[in-house]
Amino acid sequence: MDRETLGALVRAHQSELYRFLRYLGANQVVAEDLLQETFLAAFKSNNVPPEESTQQAAWLRGISRNIFLQHCRHEKRSRVHVNTDYVDQAESLWISEFLRDGDGFDYVEALRACLERLQPNQRKVVDQKYTHGLSRDEMARKNGMSADGIKSLLRRIRAALGDCISRRIGLEEIG
Amino acid sequence: MKLNPNRDRLVDQLLREVLGNETPPDVADRVLRKAYPRRKVIFWAAPAAAAAVLLIVGAWLAFSPRYPLPLLDGKPIEREAVVSTHEKARDLILGGYAHVALQPEASIRIKGSQKDERIALEKGKVTCRVNREQGRFTVETTLGNVWVTGTEFSVELIDKKGEEEMIGNKAGRALALAIIVTAGTVQVDYEGSRYAISAGQSQVFGGERKEVSQDPPKKRTPGKDGEKNAIAKGTVIGTVVAKGDSSITIRSLNGNKDEYIPEWEGGNTGGPKKSVVRQIKAVKVGDKVRAQWYVNDHLRLKSVERIEGESKEDGATEKSREEGKKEEKGAVTKKDADDDDNGDDDDDEKPIAGTEGFSGKVSGTVQSKDENGDSFTLKVKDILKTWKGNKAKNPKAMVGETIEIEGINENHLLWIKTLKEGDAIEIEIRYNEENDFQILELSESQRKTIGK
């Protein structure tokens, strides 16, 4: 693979692969490292699908999931119990829901729309967590709740957002 | 509600990107450096290497896929061209990712470059849909620039009647810039400040300035204090929904609720600017106010003044700063004693002392309604009933105070729509786990008013 082809390959797929690795459970630093390893592995391979092929993204995602699994086997402090089944199920949802339109654009737009429909109190908590980056303890103090209560509340809000997104993109029957 | 751990992580990650601005890294250079480590080039080989590079670049330019030309109604058009519409709308596609619908009687100039597409809006209205992951897109106007962090929005330059030549005049300025966001968010640079407008919101810059509320962005710059470090400044117009000793929460005309804290004076040993603290004391919950703000590491208040309302010196909110001192009856809200006055938290409110856990029926007068229609403020006249589940030790502490009450379902919101300022009402309410009052149940007559 020549330099230009490799550069083009990286620029075309790095956003989606980074998002995929973060979704699997890699933190920001690890995801960035694994992203580089993915492309270096692709560089060393002689089987890169052609640029026009829809298989190219799936091929790269396959490399990244294997690299992620290898990383987790070496890293015992992984925040989730990771095995092949876990990654298979995660990838299945990634393909069937997130990539339903090809690039996840509809899913992200549906999320934006669903955020606007949150109750003000729910939106406040979501902003505290994601916009302002408050810790769970800080949020608990500010909202007069326990840290566990905040955790449960955020999970419920994300579940509601997930349901809302599914309805918007026509996935009501799935999951 | 379906709990699916994979979907939970997916939504979690996307929220980090959409709200937390977590952006994927660009690892292209690092990957290329590792894939192609530098080698020493001996002196005599340099000209040959340069020639080889030129050949490769030339070949790449010749054979690589071309960046799409601007297309007007499907036909290529040059950059710097001026496009005007009369009775019919026209479609412009830039870079393959920015779709611009020119509405009738509009005029634009095509500007920009690859992946940084721009148009200069000279007249009229355009509606834009952008795939922001493929490149930047900016609408330039004589009033300010609008650039995309979202996907779908419209921009209109509004001329005052009888001043059709305004754009071409000496000042070169239209009278107002109107922006409506359908999906995502756009950023607007206007008179040296930057504003974010989210989906479902609209904002007019210029023109009738006194009715324009400029809401603060959510972003902060930790460790950077002082107005000189401000990343944005503006004037918000809205309704006071809560107050503390030295903080005020305002719900703007655009529906956004933010807590403002006074400017700081006196450096490390100083405190909140006294003149601003006095201004906060002079307004009441429910007043319509105009407030000047700026953002650095906090959302700072420069001034606040009442526009409408029945404000008078509000001694009722005075209370001791002594940590642990019991809150006086009558204080509507207060900040936590150990709160670090973080301007990021927009709703750090505490209930009126003794009313935590209230569940019952109150009477009172409607003071104001939230612009979004999901809450209203009520000046409490009396406590009519308390229910079995009531845990408030002193419900009467609410009497005479103005409280904000939220609706939590569709019927509530429909009923709130029917309320008018000054209405005398009775309503069943309760405190929820987040220290907000919310409607418990509508009465039969209240349901009738909304046809339920």
Image (spheres, helix red, strand yellow):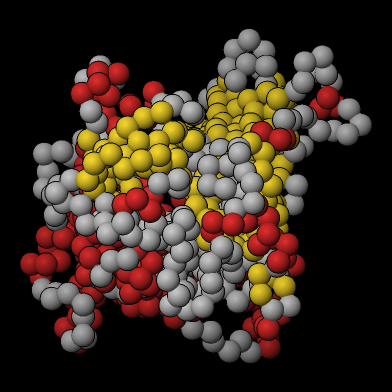
Residue at 75 percent across and 67 percent down: it is B228
Left or right for B12, reference B156: left
Between A82 and B444, the residue placed more toward the observer is: B444
B170 w.r.t. B326: above or below? above
Between A49 and B269, the residue placed more toward the observer is: B269
In the image as oriented, which residue stretches furthest toward the right? B170
Q: Position of residue B324 (x, y in %)?
A: 43, 77
In the image as oriented, which residue stretches furthest toward the top? B87
Q: Position of residue B236 (x, y in %)?
A: 63, 46
- Image quarter for residue B302? bottom right
Residue at 44 percent across and 33 percent down: it is B365
Between B371 and A144, the residue placed more toward the observer is: A144
Q: Position of residue B432 (x, y in %)?
A: 27, 52
- Image quarter for residue A113? top left
Residue at 51 percent across and 78 percent down: it is B322
Between B309 and B215, the residue placed more toward the observer is: B309
Residue at 63 percent across and 10 percent down: it is B87
- Image quarter for residue B230? bottom right
Left or right for B59, reference A133: right
Left or right for B414, reference A83: right
Q: Position of residue A5 (x, y in %)?
A: 44, 62
Q: Can residue B50 be seen here?
A: no
Q: Quadrant of the C terminus of chain B?
A: top left
